[in-house]
Amino acid sequence: MSTSLGQNTPVRETHAAVTPDKIMQIGLGFWGSKTLLSAVELGIFTHLAHGPMSGEQLEQAAGVHPRSSRDFLDALVAMGMLDRHDGHYSNTHESNIFLDKNKPSYLGGLLEMANARLYSHWAGLTEALRTGEKQNEAKGEESDDSFKTLYSDPRRLRTFLGAMTGISIPSAIAIARKFQWTKYRTFVDIGTAQGGLPTQIALAHEHITGKGFDLPIVQPIFEEYVHSFGLHKRLTFQVGNFFEDPLPEADVLVMGHILHDWNLETKMMLLEKAVQALPKGGSLIVYEALIDDERRHNAFGLLMSLNMLIETSGGFDYTGADCRGWMKKVGFSETRVEHLVGPDSMVVGIK
């Protein structure tokens, strides 16, 4: 005997083999996400970087109410974000490296921005899918440049630039290792933010000098970050607007998480400017969470494209094949795609 959903949809007794686990994990995934984001905001991982602490010690250090602290901390243990032994909590190897605010490998800036901005903005995803309109601070504004609103608030700007460092550091380290920097002497990071990528390249290759290219308001934040690594003699800042100014000339230009912010027309304009600025044999590195060519596997890249729907008026993510085609159209003679780390890959174009 079978029941039905609607008029003619029989439900067969297959529930023993098929479970809703994946549906429930994804559908309620925001529970775990918000728990981690709150832990970063409260500085849990930074407190534990000094050594294991009891639950009561963590309560006091992070300002967590006793009613919630045990479940909160044990949830982080269950999710693999913390360890617990003999009633004392400690960081995992990963959280100790990437979530301690005092380490240069800190990725929490991205999570801080996710907590402060993106978490609430994504509540508007359904509206964005229906209307095609952004849902961030600039919602309802006619301007296509969402960054004007973001950059107008110094505190919000610093959080955003820290987030860009957080999302870029793993790929920056991989680019410093995988790209053939021995063939080049100069580079410019276009839309450099704090300077996470230039710093990693300079740390790995002493013969290289570089510049960060960005808006004037970014300069003191870039210089503060670079100076903290003692690299201010080899890494300098160049004020500019890539919409209005030619791109700086160098052996290598880098655009990390830049092209996906804009519509296709602007993407092509930026690629054209890049090929014009490079010498013959020079290279452009574009890195993003590239969507796989079959659009089936890199869920992060596809979700990032939905984030561009939330954050911008026309931005979207793309496949490596898309980018190679655009590069060839504007005049690059050779192109290749190379995986970096996690969801990120780079497209290299040679003039």
Image (cartoon, grey):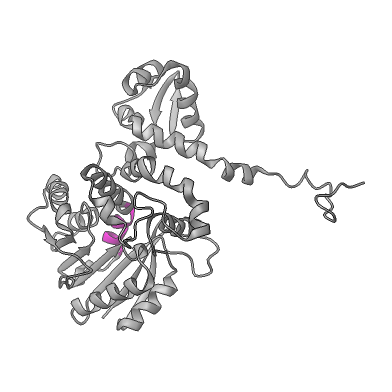
Residue 294 placement (x, y as % from top left): 53, 69
Q: Which residue ends up furthest to the left in the rendered image?
A: 233
Foreground residue among 201 and 40: 40
Residue at the image position 81 percent from the left and 52 percent from the top? 6
Foreground residue among 244 and 140: 140
Q: Which residue ends up furthest to the right in the rendered image?
A: 1
Q: Is residue 236 above or below residue 105?
A: below
Residue at the image position 32 percent from the left and 30 percent from the top? 43
Q: Is residue 334 above or below residue 13?
A: below
Residue 316, by quadrant, is bottom left
Q: Is residue 297 magenta?
A: no
Q: Is residue 153 above or below residue 62?
A: below
Residue 139 placement (x, y as % from top left): 38, 53
Q: Indicate the quadrant containing the C terminus: top left, top right, bottom left or bottom right.
A: bottom left
Residue 16, by quadrant, is top right
Residue 204 placement (x, y as % from top left): 21, 56
Foreground residue among 323 and 272: 272
Foreground residue among 335 and 208: 335
Q: Is residue 175 magenta?
A: yes
Q: Is residue 104 left or right of residue 122?
A: left
* Segment colored magenta: 170-178
Residue 58 placement (x, y as % from top left): 36, 21
